[in-house]
């Protein structure tokens, strides 16, 4: 297989930013620092050559911090950072980062907003139009109930590259497909919307999931988006709640093994290169 890229991973340093969400008792296992030297051997173990960091903080200081790390560690191919979409300051913040080659996108932790309609409020849409203007891709961190907003976003920003993180977190543990599948189908009808095959093991049963549990969700995503609009992401270190990096990688590899070599190459790298404009 050609260049393999992990399109979705995180770092955190507990003494540097506020990780209040990690105080939940069920997350105790991952409440420690996770840094590039922790990830690097895991990538090498499975043959992943490059990775993309995705934000965890609503704080541009995190973006600055990881951009500095990306200059230090060659395996970091890009940083999906954060800007304040709903702020009048959004464009200035985008301009602060957009000319840095390793700044490749923006994400907001949308699914934790108290307002389920946050991403389609006029102030947020104004921020998304700023991203569209500057050709900065946006990661949609949704639960299934947020997928209904994709048509509105595309209506206002038809040329903004969008990617749905973690398939919008369907309920894999209970084998629930609807209404997630219908809403995902509608989202996939827009050619500027992509999908990350990531974050699945933590939506399954943490202690006894199998690759077969993920298969229906992967198959539906591939059917709707095609491999050319799907990309592998580990969601490390969050994935460690339910499985090792190697287990997550192998689970996807096993489920797409019947695809052609070119389709697998798209999922495991080429889609991410095109979507984020990676210089690899």
Image: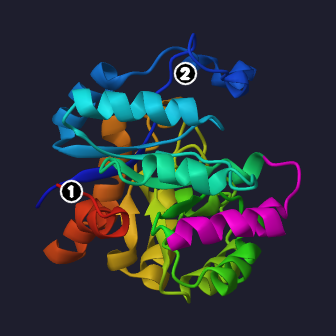
Image quarter where the C terminus lies is bottom left
- Residue sitting at the far top: 15
Q: Is residue 202 above or below residue 182?
A: above
Q: Which mark is residue 279?
A: 1
Q: CA distance from mark 2 to mark 1?
A: 31 Å
- Residue 22 position, x and y percent, is 67, 23
Residue 215 visible, this orientation:
no
Q: Crowding near pointer 1: few (<14 within 10 Å), some, many (20+)? A: few
- Residue sitting at the far left: 2
Q: Earlier in the sequence, mark 2 or mark 1?
A: 2
Q: Is residue 2 above or below residue 29?
A: below
Q: Which mark is residue 30?
A: 2
Q: Going 20% across and 67% down the picture, which residue do you hit? A: 265
Q: Going 85% across and 59% down the picture, which residue do you hit? A: 116
Residue range highlighted in magenta: 113-133
Q: Nearer the viewer, residue 170 or 58?
A: 58
Q: Is residue 223 above or below residue 235?
A: below
Taking the image as shown, residue 265 lies to the left or right of residue 18, namely: left
Q: Quadrant of residue 266?
A: bottom left
Q: Crowding near pointer 2: few (<14 within 10 Å), some, many (20+)? A: some
């Amino acid at each position: 297989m050609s260049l393999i890229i992990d399109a979705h991973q995180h770092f955190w340093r507990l003494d540097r930013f506020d990780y209040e969400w990690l105080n939940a008792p069920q997350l105790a296992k991952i409440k420690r620092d996770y840094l590039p030297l922790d990830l690097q051997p895991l990538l090498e173990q499975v043959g992943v050559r490059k990775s993309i960091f995705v934000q965890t903080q609503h704080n541009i200081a995190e973006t600055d911090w990881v951009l500095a790390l990306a200059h230090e560690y060659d395996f970091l191919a890009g940083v999906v950072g954060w800007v304040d979409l709903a702020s009048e300051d959004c464009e200035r913040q985008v301009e602060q980062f957009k000319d840095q080659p390793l700044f490749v996108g923006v994400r907001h932790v949308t699914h934790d907003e108290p307002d389920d309609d946050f991403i389609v409020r006029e102030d947020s849409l104004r921020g998304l139009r700023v991203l569209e203007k500057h050709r900065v891709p946006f990661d949609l961190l949704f639960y299934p109930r947020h997928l209904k907003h994709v048509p509105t976003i595309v209506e206002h920003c038809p040329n903004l590259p969008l990617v749905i993180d973690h398939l919008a977190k369907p309920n894999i543990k209970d084998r629930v497909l609807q209404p997630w599948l219908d809403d995902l189908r509608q989202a996939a009808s827009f050619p500027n919307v992509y999908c990350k095959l990531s974050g699945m093991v933590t939506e399954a049963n943490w202690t006894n999931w199998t690759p077969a549990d993920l298969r229906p969700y992967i198959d539906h995503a591939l059917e709707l988006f095609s491999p050319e609009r799907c990309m592998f992401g580990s969601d490390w270190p969050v994935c460690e709640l339910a499985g090792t990096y190697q287990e997550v990688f192998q689970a996807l590899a096993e489920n797409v093994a019947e695809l052609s070599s070119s389709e697998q190459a798209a999922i495991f790298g080429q889609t991410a290169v095109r979507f984020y404009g990676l210089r690899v």
